[in-house]
Image (tube, grey):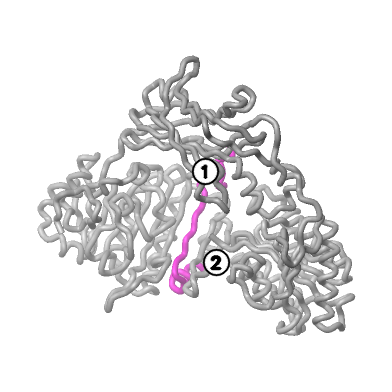
Amino acid sequence: MGSFFTNVQLLRGGRLAGQSRAAVIAVVTDAIKEVALEDGFVLADKAGKADRTVLIGGGHGDSDGRWLTIYDEGTEGQDDKRLDALAGALSAELETSAVTVLVHDSDVLEMRLFEDGKRADRYNNAPGYFDERVSKKAAAEAAGHPERWSHLLRDGVTAAAVRAIWSDETLHAETVLAKTAAALGWNGRLAGTGYSYTVAGHGVSGAQTILRLRMAERPKAEQTASGPPRFERGGYMPEPELSVGEPLQLHCDARNVGGASRGLAIVVWGEAIDRGLVAPSEVEVIVGMTLSRPQAPRVTVPLAAENGIPGLMARFADLDLRAGHDIYDKSARRLDPRTLVDLAGRSGVSAIVKGAVVAPGAGKLHVGFVPLAAQQDGQCAHTMSLSVRAASRRPLRARADVEADALRALDPSDSLAALVSFDLDRAAAAAHAADAVEKWSALLARPLGKWSIAVFRRDAGRVGSGSSKAAGFFTSPRWAKLRKEFASEQRVSCSLPVGGSLFGPDGDPDPHVHGFTFGTGMIPAQLDAGDRELPTLALSLDLTGAVPDAAAALHAIVDDLMARAQGVQALVARWDGVAGSIDRTPYERATGIYGDLLLTSWQKRYLRGVGDGPLWLGPALLERLGDRGPLERAAASVVPVGAGVRVTPAAGAAGLDALERALAPLLPRDAGSSDANDAD
């Protein structure tokens, strides 16, 4: 996950010009008090609880001490309106310039310039991040007007230089911020963080002046409701995917928005029960779980049929239901996000419907929350559309306690994934990998939207993220830079929604995504003498957005890599989730294998997976396998590729079972493996 932070940069001009830093801080503090008072805040007592804290730093130690940095706890929820109000009011009151800084997930940088209380300009590096339907006019406005910032630039810096920074699509949000800070003479370290990181000790020193505020009047949202209990729906699983034989565990939440009471019934009914797809047997409820109270009480009650009630009921007669809070009241906006989440959670009830998954098919299941003190008017219900698959195939060495979702990840999907490891130095492997990605890009039928880009730096685990238009991406300067980062950085990972958007027409996330990842482990491995991490490439092609015969073309790309780039091993399988992480494959998850799986010592000894597509064995694995007779009898084909072979499994589950038995000397074992035959 990237960084989220806000701050305000305040110029020591206007009423602040020529004053000592102590005098400047005093004037700014008074101005912030006035702004806070208009927002309903007053100074908190030294011993009292603060609802909002403001830090003031900078103004000394900068290149010329011209700027102060202000961190406001009240804007850390990415509240751009409150951020604008603070910057605008300070700019007006102090007759100077102020700039808001907002970074969202390290992808978006939004800066707004205020002069004498009015917004003079706005810059956003990704105006289509939240809404891709951005007009050309809006995009041009968001691109900023550097000439409006000319009077703020350091000596020798021109508006054209700022335009070059802002228009460079190869730069990540925080890099743009750092370069802009240097152009304006800000303290880059202070500008590159926010309140939350600073108080958590992850920020920088220099923001020491503290202003503690409390609300002049307590917000209505803090008051508890009265009257009969009344439940509103919360989160739930709208379309659970299940497999026959797995335990049934369906989660859903509700929240009491009425008064306190005692007693609750959970009712479960629907065609999913009537058709015999699932057999619910009990319900576990958790009451009042909040951020400050994560270990909330849990109670489990069996489900049973009751006369006049459809389906099954679990009755919690002695369960105390806490009164609710009106978290949607306008006064709630003055509360910090954590407090608001806690208020909502206090009267929340989570229900986990447990039982067995019995038969394949599809059907709806309803879960009702019924307060016993107001059964008609206080109830609410969730409806889930269950999809139950036949039991998934178990790998030869699957853990005995493997979860069904880990096995489902091995079921054939619309995503065709490839994984290749190279016994080359990083620079040579990067060149081969980048060439392969370019060839792979030709298999994308119609690239739309934007690539999401994440570059994991080699220094201190930093992550740079951004986006770039899909059209012409592989001939763009951004791709040219990524090719270099393949060699210089820890890892590069990119993804592209097949339909051009992360969300489908119904607003739900679209699971159809292309992607690629190249690099080594996220966390440096513990290496023995002579060992190292092998550079690894993952490619994921969604077949709903691929050209015809894409599978054969992908096999040819992997053949070429194994032959020319000293491939250690490779696989192609119809698995989801491979391109996003090279550290652990779905096969390794199902077999309980984890650790430093990119090491030479591991990859020349064990396979990283066996799927429904070909796999490639390099020389070291072939030597460890020994007699190839069982492999050649079990596989559909074994074809020489370079110094190794490509193995194609026979069709169906029986073909994979036979292939795994033949490859048993190369299959890793976990202590919880269900395979009784130790072939190591």
Q: Position of residue 418 (x, y in %)?
A: 35, 54
Amino acid found under the numbered disc labelled 2: Gly
Q: Which mark is residue 510?
A: 1
Tell me if residue 51 comes above or below residue 316 in the rendering: below
- Residue 356 or 16: which is nearer the viewer? 356
Residue at 46% x, 54% y is 515
Q: Is residue 502 magenta?
A: yes
Q: Amino acid at mark 1?
A: Asp
- Residue 75 shown left or right of residue 271 in the figure: right
Residue 477 magenta: no
Badge 1 density bin: few <14, some 14–19, many ≥20, Cα 10 Å: some
Please give the count of numbered marks on the rendered protein.
Answer: 2
The x and y percentages for residue 165 are 67, 71
Q: Position of residue 98 (x, y in %)?
A: 80, 69
Q: Nearer the viewer, residue 602 or 356?
A: 356
In this rendering, is residue 40 above or below 33?
Answer: above
Crowding around mark 2 (Cα neighbors within 10 Å: few <14, some 14 to 19, many 20+) is many
State which region is magenta. Answer: 482-509
- In the image, 301 versus 471, the foreground residue is 301
Residue identified by numbered label 2: 464
In this view, 40 is above or below 313: below
Give the quadrant of residue 601: bottom left
Question: Do residues under tags 2 and 1 come within 8 Å of each other at their CB atoms?
Answer: no
Is residue 664 visible in the rendered image? The answer is: yes
Please indicate whether residue 362 sits to the left or right of residue 81 in the image: left
